[in-house]
Amino acid sequence: MNLTPMTARGADKLREELRYRKSELRPKIIADIDEARSHGDLRENAEYHAAREQHGFNEGRITEIEAKLGSAQVIDVTQIKTHGKVVFGTTVAVADADTGEEMQYQIVGEDEADIKAGMISFNSPIARALIGKAEGDVVSVQVPSGIRELEIISLRYE
């Protein structure tokens, strides 16, 4: 079985979603199905079919989350000897060497990636270029618009 790296925060977020889906959403959907079923003919009952569809989606998501957590290798960056290098879970502040624009990224697992929140997958071109580097290093990253030179300004392990 392949383990999937995930931050402790990412694993906690999935566990919370799983708890919500099992203990709050599932009973609500089942109640909605029962309510719709009480309205009679199921063939023409849109509420019943919508509730059944929602039930199927929720159960599928529960299965998906359980599988992700089952194969998760939770990595707590605060417990790793980093030797001042960028590793999985590190929050990296970088500056574009050409424009001076500063950005901040946390290197996370595939399922946690959210570029708007500054969380990039460890498999992304930027993360692959940064991993193993230290503060002050300049990395070249191939992006859709060409090659960007990024200087590592600071690292945080949280």
Image (cartoon, rainbow, N blue to C red):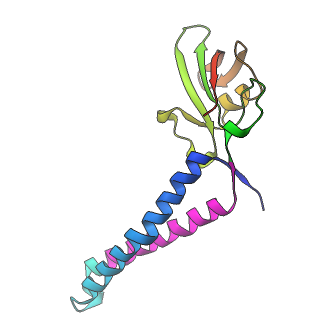
Image quadrant in which you'd find residue 38 = bottom left
Residue 23 can be seen, yes or no: yes
Tell me if residue 52 comes above or below residue 79 in the rendering.
Answer: below
Establish if 75 lies above or below 142.
below
The magenta segment is 49-74
Q: Which quarter of the image is occupied by the C terminus?
A: top right
Q: Quadrant of the N terminus?
A: bottom right
13 horizontally vs 33: left or right: right
Viewer-closest of 102 and 52: 102
Residue 79 versus residue 12 in the image, above or below: above
Q: Is residue 70 magenta?
A: yes
Q: Quadrant of residue 26?
A: bottom left
Q: Name the residue at 61% across, 47% down.
A: 8
Can residue 123 be seen here? The reply is no
| Horizontal relation, residue 90 to residue 116: left or right | right
Q: How many marks?
A: 0
In percent of width and height, residue 127 lies at 67, 31
Q: Is residue 74 above or below residue 49?
A: above
Residue 114: percent from left, percent from top? 52, 39
Is residue 156 a member of the stretch shown in magenta?
A: no
Query: x and y percent of residue 100 in the render?
Result: 55, 8
**Residue 29 position in % (x across, y down):** 35, 75
Residue visible at 57% across and 64% down in the picture: 64
Question: Dominant secondary structure of the magenta stretch?
Answer: helix
Query: Which residue is depicted at the point 74% across and 23% down?
Result: 84
Query: Which residue is most to the front?
Result: 79
> Quadrant location of residue 149?
top right
